[in-house]
Amino acid sequence: MRKFFIIGLIIVLGIVFGSLIYGSQYNSDMSNSTSQTSLEKGNYSKLKVGDAVLNVEVVRDISLQSKGLSGRQEIGSDGMLFVFPSKRIPSFWMKEMNFDLDMIWIKDGRVLEITRNIPKPANNNDQLKMYSPSQPIDQILEVYAGDSLRLGIEFGDEVTQIK
């Protein structure tokens, strides 16, 4: 059992340090970008997922992605869209979350998977579960728990940004 704990700890630390190293490289590449400045202030866009049209906050910056919706009392729009510069299998957790979520994993402009009704932690001492897709993705959309069903969002739905 101890062996599995140590292996798991090494994997988690590798992911964290890899994200930090990659994030600093990505941030320096993006430092002169106009879109970077607008994202720091909150960049919103219309997104069509299947037949549903949502107003979403778009987050590309790695440091903003790591914070995500933590500490907020509400999403502040229909959802938060995380956009990655390349495909990956990210890990998300519900640290300091104040509401339940659905996570819509997106690859190449299509809904790959949906993780529904992820509960906020009951308290700050909870062991936090990690959530990841089964294969590399390039975007994730977080919406209130139940919204993916209410909006009729399904596996395979096309995802497009509306100008």
Image (cartoon, rainbow, N blue to C red):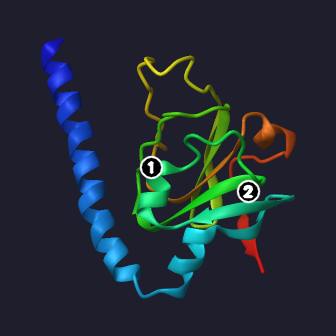
Dot 2 falls on a residue whose secondary structure is loop
Where disc 1 sits, the SS reads loop
- Give the residue at mark 1: 135
Residue at position x 67%, y 32% in the image: 99
Q: Nearer the viewer, residue 109 or 40?
A: 40
**Residue identifier under label 2:** 157
Question: Which residue is depicted at the point 30% across and 56% down?
Answer: 19
Q: Position of residue 144 (x, y in %)?
A: 73, 40
Q: Tell me which residue sits at (17%, 29%) in the image.
A: 7
138 or 144: which is nearer to us? 144
Q: Amino acid at mark 1?
A: Gln
Q: Examine the rendered structure and indicate whether residue 19 appears above or below residue 13.
A: below
What whole-number distance in Å separates the C-alpha atoms at marks 1 and 2? 17 Å
- Residue 84 at x, y = what percent? 47, 65
Q: How packed is label 1: few (under 14 Cα within 10 Å), some, or many (20 or more)?
A: few
Residue type for callout 2: Asp
Q: Pick the residue in front: 24 or 112.
A: 24
Q: State the quadrant of the N terminus.
A: top left
Seen at 49% across and 59% down, the residue is 64
Residue 123: x percent and y percent?
A: 52, 18
| Residue 117: quadrant of the picture | top right
Q: Which mark is residue 107?
A: none
